[in-house]
Amino acid sequence: MNAIKISDITMKQEGKELSLSFKEKIELAKLLDKLDVSVIEVEGIRSSKIDSLRIKSIASAIQSGILAVPVQLDKDSVQQTWNALCSAKHPRLQVCASVSSVQMEYLYHKKNDSMLTSVSETIAACKALCSDVEFVADDATRSDPVFLAQILTAAIEKGASTVTVCDTAGTMMPEEFAAFVRNLYDTIPTLKDVTLGVCCANDLSMADACVIAAACQGAGELKTAAYPVNTASLLSVSRIISARGDSFGVACSVRVTQLSRTVNQITWLCQTGRSKNTPFAGGVQEEDTDIYLTAHDDMSGVLKAVERMGYDLSEEDGSRVYEAFQTIAAKKEKVSAKELDAIVASAAMQVPSTYRLDTYVINAGNTVAATAHLKLYKNDVPMEGVSIGDGPIDAAFMAIESITGCHYELDDFQIQSVTEGREAMGQAVVKLRAEGKLYSGKGISTDIVGASIYAYINALNKIVYEEETV
């Protein structure tokens, strides 16, 4: 029985056919890992600071699967990507290149010899850092067969343990793709020593059938997607292998009993429309965390929990957070993740107030759209903003964005009562993400909308302060 690896490329399509927030990408990786998907593929590094942090965060979230990240065809990209990926339990570096003449010249401005040299050198650089290296031959089905065999052979010689061929145009029928794979095994003797992966576009709605046909011919890794992104379906391919794999001698590790429910979760996650007119981007249904601390936890344990939650604190802020934690832990049996959020928001990175709230007027009702009119002072200069939102808090946050001219990803928003009675005090914690880094702010007021505004401005001031001091 041939054990097939199922790879998911949903996150590689981010920005093309779907848009996910930082937090949603981590949640998606967790869901795929729980399904026992063999390989989880993500975008490479374009913006060094943001993307490096994204890869590190996903790496810490994946427990059993391989995390695959593509590199560009240069050694600097290889090192930068490896620095972000090296903490993963099962890292993989991918070298992707078009191998058809048209795409080589149009996308890479290279001829056959130049592309062969670039790919060979990049794979060798990857192999020097990572034991698991994959070469992905884009548009392989439209390439020159002689050159394709040559570049695949060179990739294997340089250390690629997986080589993947792609029907990027998506024009092949299942029997044609099966013959294409069979011919590769016949013409490249060393191919039997590595894993052959396949990826098929779904332009003719044949991708599922094509990758299954390739598996019947010996392909060991199938690229799929949990959310429809013009490639083979994770749901369909896994079900076919589960139901009929015995008949053609293949099996996969995907948990089919959980598959339908998890794919529905992923679909909901990817389809949650994030309007550009709202800071709320709630595709994550609930915070899946098991962080609970007690008074017995030392500073190292507390700061590891804080780092796991996504914060990057300085040594000074870490000391302040631990001191505040000790005060809370002395009064409680356990300190939860939400309480730790509030501690970080109130104790870490206390900065001068670039923005401060002067007045706010909120209008809302069940027959009118919520509107917010805010007046802020920026370094004693008055600024006003008016906005419409899906609710009073949404409208208030939109008004702040109109004043500042900046939009930040709202990573989390929490509200709770801290006192009882008619004049109860409400506490809000707002977590904003800027340049991949998390900033949290806390606000307290008898008006929960006011508490939310204070919390947002508190987090905003931390971002502005750090941007101005860099």
Image: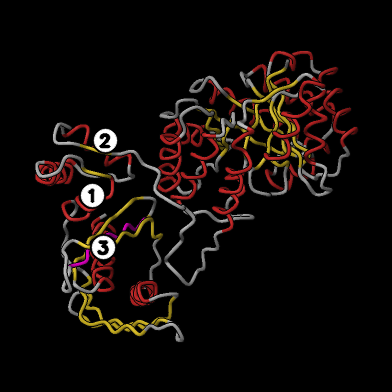
- The answer to whether marks 1 and 3 mark residues whose Cβ atoms lie closer than 8 Å is no
Residue under pointer 3? 428
Query: Between 323 and 46, which is closer to the camera in this rendering?
Result: 323
Residue 399 spot, x, y in % from top left: 36, 77
Instruction: Please tell me whether the stretch drawn in magenta is mainly helix, strand or loop.
Output: strand
Magenta span of residues: 425-433
Residue under pointer 2? 304
- Label 2 or label 3, whichever lies nearer to me, is 3
Which scheme is used to colour this image of the protein? secondary structure
Residue 132 spot, x, y in % from top left: 56, 22
Task: Write the residue at 79% across / 13% down.
Answer: 189
364 left or right of 109?
left
| Type of the residue with mark 3 | Ala
Which numbered tag is attached to residue 356?
Answer: none
Q: Quarter of the image for the C terminus: give it.
A: bottom left
Q: Is 427 a magenta residue? A: yes
| Type of the residue with mark 2 | Lys
Task: Write the residue at 43% across / 81% down.
Answer: 388
Task: Write the residue at 55% across / 41% down.
Answer: 42
Q: How packed is label 1: few (under 14 Cα within 10 Å), some, or many (20 or more)?
A: some
Which numbered tag is attached to residue 339?
Answer: 1
